[in-house]
Amino acid sequence: MTYISFCTHSTMRSQTIWRSFGLLQLQRQSISYRKPITYRALQTASPIATSRPIPNFAFAFDIDGVLLRASKPIPGAADSLALLKEQGIPFILLTNGGGKHETERVAEISEKLGVPLDATDIVQSHSPFAELVKGSDESNALEHKCVLVAGGDGDNCRRVAEQYGFKNVVTPADILMAYPAVWPFSKNFSDYYKKFARPLPTPINFKDPSKSLKIDAVFVFNDPRDWALDTQVIMDLLLSSQGRMGTLSKKNGRFDLPNHGYQQDGQPHLYFSNPDLWWAAAYPLPRLGQGGFREALEGVWAATTGGPSKGIELKKTVIGKPYQFTYEFAERQLLQNRLRTFGSSANFTPLENVYMVGDNPESDIRGANSYRSEIGSSWHSILVRTGVYSGGEPAWIPQTIADDVHKGVQWALKRSSWPAA
Ligand SMILES: [Mg+2]
């Protein structure tokens, strides 16, 4: 995975996800459901009169295991967010969760915590996928291409993708209901699938592959509910010719081609939105996350192709914490929110420090420690004990360990010499 860099004064360019994904030629424009911040916007914003000092810091909070656990508020979480709101201190919720549109997700969190939030206050694992709808230009825009969306309850993720602007979204359930033989062991779940499956835009044509259903990108938006079906359908596409269902590429296994011919025949690119292997849920021990599904798929891929021991990789793009791109996306959103709150006055107090409060050393802490901001902000990691982390020396060492989010916020306010601490 290649990383992108943040916009700079010299280039005035907007950030775009396809640069991170290494897709085609980059263009210096970006279209998104939320417009990326630019320094030009910062410089031309109107000042907003305020008697308050503008903080040179902000917060990023993980959700599961920090603010909520099994959908229940963690003590101190609501008070902490309310205090920051009251003090005008910007924050963003930065989660590897997803499966719902940002508007719906913040409405639920808002209700649970009793703190008003809006869609710009959250970055979910799949939020950056919205930037692929328009792409950098028409040649790589996925808006009207057929994309497969896997994961999530029912077809919630299809509907999120449609809200992002994807016009032609297929789910594994659509394929199963049209062709039950594609994965015979899922027929027991057909009552579930038929509630939301839709007719395929094009049938699978075994006689004339050029007319068969063609998938141009595969997105794992959220944790798959039926790992087996999703694994089968995704493998079918990764081994296909040109992403056409019902085909098998003749290039697979050819030693004279890069990657032994695998993924060298116009197959759809594979995107994962969340690398977390484990996450904190209601069960006392951590549960397998979307990263678990990815590892399982990698295992099937390696067993099928020969895998890394034969020099064959599974080409894919993974976003979400701890990856640089997701932190850049979040920092952009924080800057945009600061601009909206403080107007151009925000220019006189640059964002210098961001406190990342998380429960998962592998994602939250690793990401904050590794992040390199091109606006020069420093990210400080605060590990809490209310989620995945259960004590001992964490795999990634945070700047501090706090019992809970309230203690973590107090530590940060004190560190920044904020009067309310
Ligand atoms: Mg967490």
Image (cartoon, rainbow, N blue to C red):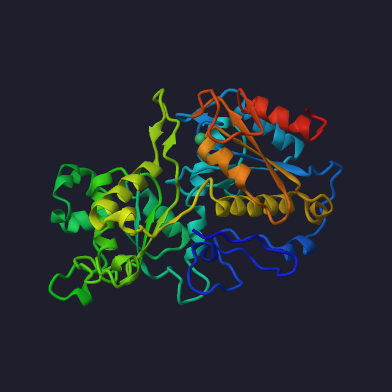
Q: Residue at x 72, y 55 (%)?
A: 375
Task: Determine whether, in the image, residue 348 is placed left or right of residue 312.
Answer: right
Q: Say which quarter of the image contains residue 357.
A: top right
Q: Do we see residue 3 in this rendering? A: yes
Residue nearer the viewer, 205 or 309: 309
Q: Position of residue 99 (x, y in %)?
A: 42, 46
Q: Identify the residue at image location x=74%, y=49%.
A: 341
Name of the residue lying farthest toward the right: 51
On the image, which quarter does residue 241 sit in? bottom left
Q: Is residue 324 above or below residue 28?
A: above
Name the image quarter holding the C terminus.
top right
Residue 194's x, y, as percent?
Answer: 22, 49
Query: Would residue 79 be visible to someone looking at this image?
Result: no
Q: Which one is in front, 172 or 307? A: 307
Q: Can you say whether 116 is above or below 297 in the image? A: above
State whether residue 120 is above or below residue 4.
above
Q: Is residue 22 left or right of residue 56?
A: left
Residue 364 vs residue 335, the one in the foreground = 364
**Residue drawn at 13 percent across, 49 percent down:** 184
**Where on the picture, by quarter, is residue 5?**
bottom right
Image position, residue 128 (x, y; %) = 52, 56
269 up-or-down from 70: above or below: below
Nearer the observer, 8 or 344: 8
Q: How many marks on residues? A: 0
Q: Residue at x 78, y 64 (%)?
A: 44
- Measuring from the top left, give residue 356's x and y in whole percent: 63, 39
